[in-house]
Amino acid sequence: MMTSSPGPVVLIVDDAEDCVATMDIALQAVPGIVIRSAASAEAALAALENEPICAVITDLQLPGMSGLDLIASMRGHAKWNMLPIVAVSAAADAGLPKAALESGANAFFPKPFSPAALRKKLEELIYAR
């Protein structure tokens, strides 16, 4: 295994493997990007502790701690409060986009979303910093 520093690491937090796979494929077009995934908010927080992550894409419906709670937890932590966060959700709740943005997400995409639009937004968030 190489010890050279990987490119920007994006953490995808979703308990649906097909959603993770779709996002992974969409983001592979971003040069040098490294994709990690976590099936729960708790696993995401552990991943954030263990590796430098440059952005998080999280589903809002997760087992255990919700995506909104994950976003709020990250925003309350000095180490992660400036990380770009994109929230995604298949829920029909009309208040979710507002709740996600109020919790601290930088963007919200309803599922199903355009992989190209998600990739473009993520590139803006990562490289505009």
Image: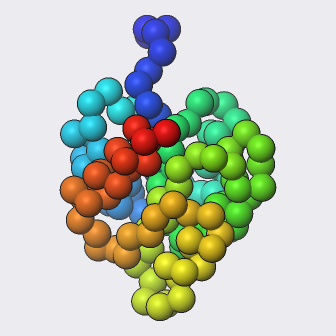
Horizontal arrangement in the rendering, residue 96 relative to residue 17 (left or right): right
Residue 28 point in image, percent of width and height: 26, 39
Q: Nearer the viewer, residue 92 or 8?
A: 8
Tell me which residue sits at (46%, 34%) in the image. Answer: 9
Horizontal arrangement in the rendering, residue 111 relative to residue 102 (left or right): left
Residue 8 seen by the camera: yes
Inspect this view and state whether residue 24 appears.
no
Residue 38 position within the rendered picture, expressed as x and y whole percent measured from the top left: 53, 49
Q: Residue at horizontal 46%, vertical 64%? A: 107
Q: In the image, is residue 64 above or below residue 120?
A: below
Residue 20 falls in image quadrant: bottom left
Measuring 44% from the left and 21% from the top, which residue is drawn there? 6
Residue 97 in percent (x, y) is at 49, 79
Residue 5, image x, y percentages: 48, 15
Q: How is the image coloured?
A: rainbow
Q: Is residue 32 left or right of residue 54?
A: left
